[in-house]
Image (cartoon, rainbow, N blue to C red):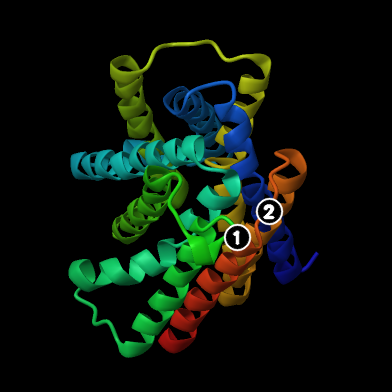
Amino acid sequence: MEKQKLSYVYALISIVLWSTVATAFKLGLRELNFIQLLWYSSIVSLIALFVIIVVQKKLFLLKTLRLKDIAYSAFLGLLNPFGYYMVLLKAYSLLPAQLAQPLNYTWPIMLVLLSVPLLKQKLPPFSLVAIFISFSGVYFISSKGNPLNFTFEEPFGVFLATFSSIIWALFWIYNVRDKKDEVIKLFLNFVFGLLYVSIALFLFSDFQLPTQNGLYATLYIGLFEMGITFVMWLKAMQLTNSTAKISNLVFLSPFLALIFIHFILEEKIYWTTFLGIVLIIIGIIIQQIKKK
């Protein structure tokens, strides 16, 4: 198979797997609290990433790390997986999956906003239009099918789901500055992330062995949200002759996620959820087109 076709295969598999994660989060949260779910999933992901490092013969790269490299990974691990997933999973514990998933999808817009103070970039008028369109999508999603008589039923959950996109955007900005190998970076992030989650588990939760369904959920999340899928996506980006073509496939993810949410979780999908996702994506596309 030629490289471009193979890159599409890797990318589409990654997108389908990521589209199932919202459902896996909700199933896992039926069995464990959000800290316990993150703790077990982080262990699974850390093991999977270590195996990948061994298979890719990159273990020697760990020996070349300097103290400042390790310190930077400790900082990134605080953002992701610890901060990002702690906030996101708490949001999922409060909100229906069809609300939490697309609200988290606003991170490209948050990236634009954060680039102003952190990267000293200007905010041109078209960016303001894109941001307005995307945040109108957030409004529709939060309205749960009733935009004309809107009341926040779970304002804290909506805040957390949206705030998780800010944490992810921050992680994206600082992660780009880290010049280590991508898989090594992710592995080290999870080393420190697991340490932070372990402290949170000790302070704010308790140790609980997962049920059979809980174990399945943690294995799935650890492998296909946090670990293997990321490596498959990297492979797709390495094989393609156009990263834009591959990146744009990500827009399929929130719509595919609604299918899994509806048929597996049996959530009734609000028309405002679909409209909100469309508006968020339109805002992101406008931002990308104007950048080009």
Q: Which of 20 and 48 is in front in this view?
A: 20
Tell me if 87 is positioned left or right of 49 in this view: left
Q: Tell me residue 35's x, y (percent).
A: 42, 26
Whether residue 166 appears in this view of the structure is yes
Residue at position x 67%, y 21% in the image? 213
Q: Please say if the residues under marks 2 and 1 sit with CB atoms less than 8 Å apart.
A: yes
What number is the disc on residue 273? 1
Q: What element carries label 1?
A: helix
Q: In which quarter of the image is residue 26?
A: top right
Q: What residue type is labelled 1?
A: Thr
Residue at position x 65%, y 57% in the image? 270
Q: Tell me residue 242's x, y (percent).
A: 60, 77
Report the quarter where the N terminus lies: bottom right
Total numbered labels placed on residues in the image: 2
Q: What element carries label 2?
A: loop
Specify few, some or many for label 2: CA neighbours under 10 Å numbering under 14, 14-19, or 20 or more: some
Tell me if 260 is positioned left or right of 131 in this view: right
Q: Tell me residue 23's x, y (percent).
A: 64, 41
Q: Which amino acid does label 2 sit on?
A: Ile
Q: List the residue tagged with mark 2.
A: 269
